[in-house]
Amino acid sequence: MSKKQPAKKSSPKASASKSRIGFVGVGRMGANMARRLNDLKYKVTAVYDVNAEAAESLAKEIGATVCKKLADVTAQSDIVFTVVTNDAAMKKIFLGKGDNLLEGAAGRTFVNCATLSPGIQQKVAAAASKAKADSIEACMASSISHARNGQLYLMIGAEKAVFDKNLKLLQDLSVSLRHIGEVGKAAEVKALVNMVMNINTAGLAEGLGLAAALGHDLGMIREVFSQTGANSRVLETDAADMVDREHDCWFSAEHAAKDSGIAAGLAKSVKLNLPLNAATQAQYDRMVELGIGGLDKSGIAELTFPGRTGASKKKGKKADKKK
């Protein structure tokens, strides 16, 4: 957008660099995106989160206002980023009775960044259009540090004109981005990305777990994997954590289960059987059942390495059944 046509602060049609920006959902990803834009001198004016302490802390840090109502975020913003946990949360913030983001939303733009089903993204976009607002689906395939440093990889679903209008803002958050198509299509692609990533992570955990059970040096195994057809991106990002049992959360097992489930739903809609995805989802669902869904996705190794927590609990349950 041209910087030669600045609009008044209060105008919801202001260019991105002059617009007031709000955030709904300021966990690790949302908060770091807000910090990134604040660093670049964007006017981050309003924040909202069900975790009031997180919202208050971020607002104090970047000089924003904590909003108690969703409608207040819309009133104080021209562009609103949403980063929520699941479809239910998305439905609540946009379509909930009483207080929601679409109250007084005419002229606003909503940039929805969570990994959600294509259906809810399309439903929200339709509701936003009815409220005379724009909607952008900005699916992220990156981690917390990438959000902080403006190095996200973004898959965008939006009308071309809306995408073009907000391109500079999206570029300032990303190292690379791709306009996939209309709203809903980016969510489909993101589901594919996470499905394959989760399958690769589960496969790596099983390979390293079996190697450990056979008594191999896991450093040697990782080096061999890296030079052969067993190589993958998750070997680089997760293998050491699996071996060392360092599962500080960058992308939780609970979210992995949700995202594999989204892919399963898409497969069902086109009558396609995905046995590897089903097995992977079952593993991540198992982590949630065991109370370790808050671990990073690398924690799936706890189910496969001999003698670890998940494996021992599973054996215990089988033993109980035999009694």
Image: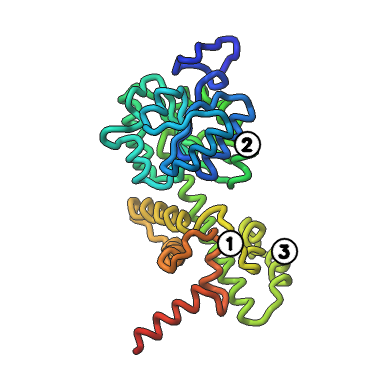
Hey, what amino acid is under mark 3?
A: Gln
* Nearer-the-camera pick, 165 or 192: 165
Question: Image quadrant for the N terminus?
Answer: top right
Q: Which residue is mark 2?
A: 150
Q: Which residue is mark 1?
A: 247
Q: Secondary structure at mark 1?
A: loop
Residue sitting at x 64%, y 65%: 230
- Taking the view exactly as shown, the residue that stands out farthest to the bottom is 323
| Amino acid type, label 2 | Gly
Specify which label sits upstream in the sequence, 3 or 1: 3
Q: How many marks?
A: 3
* Placement of 314 over or under 190, stated as above or below: below
Q: Which residue is depicted at the point 54% across and 43% down?
A: 29
**Percent x, y of residue 156:** 50, 35
Q: Residue at x 48, y 50 (%)?
A: 192
Q: Is residue 293 above or below residue 104?
A: below
Residue ID for mark 3: 227
Q: Nearer the viewer, mark 1 or mark 2?
A: 1
Distance, label 3 to label 1, CA atoms, is 25 Å
Q: Is residue 86 above or below residue 294?
A: above
Q: Nearer the viewer, residue 203 or 104?
A: 104
